[in-house]
Image (spheres, rainbow, N blue to C red):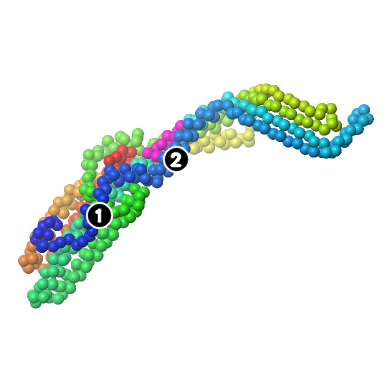
Amino acid sequence: MKNLLKYSLCLLFLPFGDASAQQILSLKEAVSIALANNYDIKLSNNENKIAENDLRYGKTALLPSLTGNFSNSGNIQNTQVDLANGDSREANNAKTTNLNYGVTLNWKIFDGLQMFANYDRLQELQKLGELNAQLTVQNTIADVIAAYYSLAAQKKQLEATETALEVSQVRLKNAQSRYTLGKGAKLELLAAKVDMNTDTTQLLMQQDAIKSAKVRLNQLLSRDLQIDFDIDDDILIDQSLVYQNLKNLIDTQNPDLRTAEINRSISEIYIRQVKGARLPVISLNSGYNFAKSTSPPTGFALRSNSHGLNYGVTASLNIFNGWQQNRAEKNAKLSLDNANLDYERVKQDVNAQLLTSYQTYQTSLQLITLEEKNVAVAEENLKITLEKYRLGSIVPLELREAQRNYMDATARYSNALYQAKISEISLKEITGSIAL
């Protein structure tokens, strides 16, 4: 349409900048930059590493603990001692010292299997951390794709706005010539100026929308917000999605459903941990200690040293703790009930979301076909109307109406393409299968 108008009317586009000097950013490049820079992904990866570390060192709970200890103390006292044989002893500023050091080993060999349940819980938390990291990546990719194609739709709308402005420029030039030659009324000239100013305003607003869309995309890429670039504005739609195939993927790949399933497993493990408190706790303990003390000459021993090995076993059993054990077990079972209910609720929500998104997807595909035909019809209508206007066989109002029809048809077509793409992205997000 642009080339036709240029040829027919010998007009040039308004100078909007040199697009050839801009970097062409492909969708694949945009996603790669986001995966490398996005702050949410980095935060999620660090959280996942924390869960991995917890699991890696979680086995240490099964190992004994070894503790070193050291103490050195002293005091100075005035002491008077009366002995049973009638003698008395007295010491002023008498100094007493005590030195102790050694190592202590404690090994909890049985705690009602709570340590094993805790390790199982750490495994589930690690799965949850990994899933959250994957989910963050999926969401980021979806956001980048949506922002990229939003910009593409805005660019298509800009092209239509530029075309409408060109037509208004031709109309204004024609009205000015007619008015100068005395063949046209001033009212026609003023109306042409108003319409051209309106189209210019629309063009400025559309250019601002594109700038804002670029800032949004740069924000998602976590790079300098003022970086200018151009994109490939072709919006390609995957039209091969089948509802039943998507539904089959939900049970195994939907992120929300998998999260609810892991939370249910964690609740089951927590019940095992709570019930383990009813069983005895058995520990082995041992140690090696050295002790040295000095005393004033008021007692029988002035100095003593001792060192040696000690060992033993301890066992404890929770017999009664004010029914707190019963309370904890009941609450753990209620938490599991909630986890089961949450799983069913999430499954219902996901299925509803899938059905709604698929219906929107199907409708958008139909609208694309319809609006594409409407654009072709509106473009041809504008071409014919413009030619008639040049020949003077129609009034300016008919040309303006053809302009509006072309603009509206182009806007609807761009929106249908964008909505179809958004629906496609949403379906792939739900099924956990989003990819380039």
Residue 425, magenta (yes or no): no
The residue type indicated by label 2 comes to: Glu
Q: Nearer the viewer, residue 93 or 103?
A: 93
Res 379 → quadrant: bottom left
Residue sitting at 39 percent across and 43 percent down? 41
Are the two marked residues, 1 and 2, in contact with CB atoms closer than 8 angstroms? no
Q: Nearer the viewer, residue 22 or 311?
A: 22
Left or right of 104 in this view: 402: left
Q: Which residues are magenta?
A: 122-134
Residue 130, magenta (yes or no): yes
Q: How far from the left and from the top, in percent, is residue 45?
A: 41, 40
Q: Which residue is mark 2?
A: 47
Q: Earlier in the sequence, mark 1 or mark 2?
A: 2
Residue sitting at 69 percent across and 34 percent down? 71
Residue sitting at 11 percent across and 75 percent down? 179
Q: How far from the left and from the top, in percent, is residue 87?
A: 92, 30
Q: How far from the left and from the top, in percent, is residue 428?
A: 30, 41
Q: Which numbered tag is attached to residue 154? A: 1
